[in-house]
Image (cartoon, grey):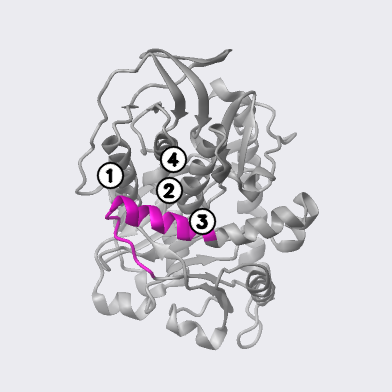
Amino acid sequence: MSDRIAQELGRPFWWEGLPDAVPEGDLPERCDLLVIGGGYTGLSAAIAAHDCGARVVVVDAGLPGRGASTRNGGMFGAQPRLGWDVLVQRYGEAVARGGFEEASTSLTWALGLIAAEGIDCDLQACGRIALAWTARHLEGYRETVRSLTARSSVQAELVEREDLGAHIRTEQYFGGMFLPQHCAIQPRKFHDGLLAAVQRRGIPVVAQCPVTRLERVGGFAAETPRGRILAERVVLATGGYTTRAFRWHQARVFPLPSYIIATEELSPDLIAHIAPGRRNMVESRARHSYFRVSPDGKRILYGGRAAMVGIDLRRAAANLRGTMVEVWPELEGARITHGWTGNTGYSFGHMPQVGVYNGVHFAMGFSGSGTVMAPYLGAKAAYRALGDARGETAFSGTTLRPHVMHPTPRPHFLRAADLWYRNYVDRREGAGARVIGRGRRL
């Protein structure tokens, strides 16, 4: 297998052929709104605040967007990660209903942003299919479809096993849930388009400028290696890359690595055979695999939980390749040309929040749904910071909670979780969920 994996891994497929533009400029002395973080969340917040009349500055600890915003799978759509009953129990019916509805409105809003700013990001209206690994998972999707169609404007369709061939060719799944409104994007191009929109507005974007200390001084004083800046308001938009300067947030949103591989260019006939619908595809088992055809239609991009901690990229690529071939045995001979990783900002409740702590507004905890929810909720956080009524969102009614297993800034608990998933959950799903007879997996 090792001869099927490129020797040099690390650079995302999405970055190929695109220049590494580095924003230049000095840190201003003051602003109305300081945005910390230059990914989807922060850039969208900057656009919203500027268009409200605020003087905005964006700072980033590294190069803007070089975190999850340009390393994700490019699946553009949102759905509640928790079921209706769980949301009602935790947050009440108003938040649950609003969260279900915003799964639809957030996508409409994001597509409007792409159109308004003229962002060329290889947008494809391909839909997403969630694939049921077991018969029990399919029943769960059946209930989700009922909830979504009854309580929101999200379009959702149950796909029985005999109808899966229109979406994907494999014997592994028992059916699925199709979300026809979902789209696919090239995530690096989407980020570059947001950055260009920010720069067209004359908003300073300062790279290599981590905030090492933030003090309340009427407004705020932010200390950075590039100098000190005074701001009336602050929006924190650092997600899975939040630093120790923001320990309250770091205790509630932890970095969960996700890994992705890209195959070599494949024949058009092979692509058409294994992925006839060219959908975004995700699966229900705990490996959290997600996969799609590249925008040019020539490769398969395959991501998921290769590990819950940082591991060697060749080992991660081998893990993902093994799972990919399990789904599509036809790809046994395919070479892996790219492999990379990025941090998802995960919350213990699996839900994002738009909130404020100690005067700092934030939007984070997207838990794997950030391609649409991050820019949408970034704008909401900016509006709320400025007292604009457009900041109203059900996600201000959710919470980010700490966990007893995460008492330190570093998520050491992920090592134990990684062992648990690899040695128990994955084996149970692989061995305990055996196919019995024809088309039945327990």
Q: Position of residue 415 (x, y in %)?
A: 61, 39
Distance from Cα at disc 2 to Cα at disc 4: 42 Å
Mark 2 lies on residue: 315
Residue 159 in the figure: left or right of residue 342: right
**Mark 3 burial class by Cα count in 10 Å: few <14, some 14-19, many 20+:** many
Three-letter amino acid code at the position of disc 3: Ser
Q: Earlier along the polypeptide chain: callout 2 or callout 1?
A: 1
Q: Is residue 382 magenta?
A: no
Distance from Cα at disc 4 to Cα at disc 1: 40 Å
Three-letter amino acid code at the position of disc 1: Glu
Q: Earlier along the polypeptide chain: callout 2 or callout 4?
A: 4
Q: Earlier along the polypeptide chain: callout 4 or callout 1?
A: 1
Mark 3 lies on residue: 106
Looking at the rendering, in which quadrant would you find the C terminus? bottom right
Mark 1 lies on residue: 8
Q: Earlier along the polypeptide chain: callout 3 or callout 1?
A: 1
Q: Between label 4 and label 1, give the one nearer the viewer.
A: 4
Viewer-side residue, 35 vs 391: 391
Q: Is residue 107 magenta?
A: yes
- The answer to which image quadrant residue 102 occupies is bottom right
Q: Up-down: is 109 above or below 297? A: above
